[in-house]
Amino acid sequence: MPALVLASSSPRRRALLEQIGIVPARTLSPDIDETPRRDELPRDYAVRLAAEKAAAVPRGPGEVVIAGDTTVAAGRRILPPAETDDVVRQCLMLLSGRRHRVYSAVAVIDAEGRLRERVAETIVTFKRLSAAEIDAYVRAGEGRGKAGGYAIQGRAAAFVRFLSGSYSGVVGLPLYETSALLAASGVVPSDG
């Protein structure tokens, strides 16, 4: 079986892979420009970033590389990774009481160098958030560094009124799509 290289610094992506019995041999952090292109749609953006991340890390002989990207979109607007408390607050205020989409793309480059991609689209609806709820979430620090300013696997789970699609995709890696791509590339879950 080929060795798997995870092109991500996200502990969530590694944990999600391990959840389905896949343990990467190596983890490398890709260094790419994540600036959206002019008029780029959120779905296209997520797929492009996943492919660029996979291509950005070195792949040794017989290795398979996997990368992912999770993009939160309000309409055609791509929400940034929330690097500051102010951005977390802005994202939550925008998402409060409304539906948004999460595009979770995965890209795999197999041992022969072939690129395969899939994307999961998930619809998420937040309840209307009070100023106190937003303040408490910002203070908790959980949304920093997260696409759209929230982590669905944490406290933000209490904000979700409706979800249709891939829960694991919103966390960081759509496991159904990931498993299919890895199997097509010869990477299967370990026995232990």
Image (spheres, rainbow, N blue to C red):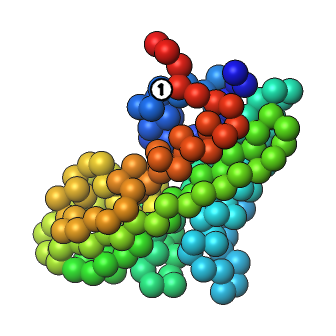
* Residue 162 on image: x %, y %: 23, 68
Residue at 71% x, 52% y is 116
* Residue 54 on image: x %, y %: 72, 47
Relative side of 80 to 116, left or right: left
The N terminus - image quarter: top right
Camera-side residue of 1 and 18: 1
Camera-side residue of 11 and 85: 11
Packing grade of label 1 (10 A; few <14, some 14-19, many >=20) is some
Residue at the far top in the pictured view = 192
Residue 135 in view here: no
- Element marked by disc 1: loop
| Image quadrant where residue 2 sits | top right
- Residue type highlighted by circle 1: Gly
Residue 138 drawn above or below residue 90:
above
Residue 176 drawn above or below residue 189:
below
Relative side of 188 to 29, left or right: left
Relative side of 163 to 47, left or right: left
Residue at 22% x, 56% y is 157
* Residue 74 on image: x %, y %: 42, 80
Residue 141 drawn above or below residue 100:
above
Q: How many marks?
A: 1
Residue 21 in view here: yes
* Residue 105 on image: x %, y %: 57, 58
Residue at 28% x, 61% y is 138
Q: Which residue is mark 1?
A: 21
Residue at 84% x, 42% y is 113
| Image quadrant where residue 42 sits | bottom right
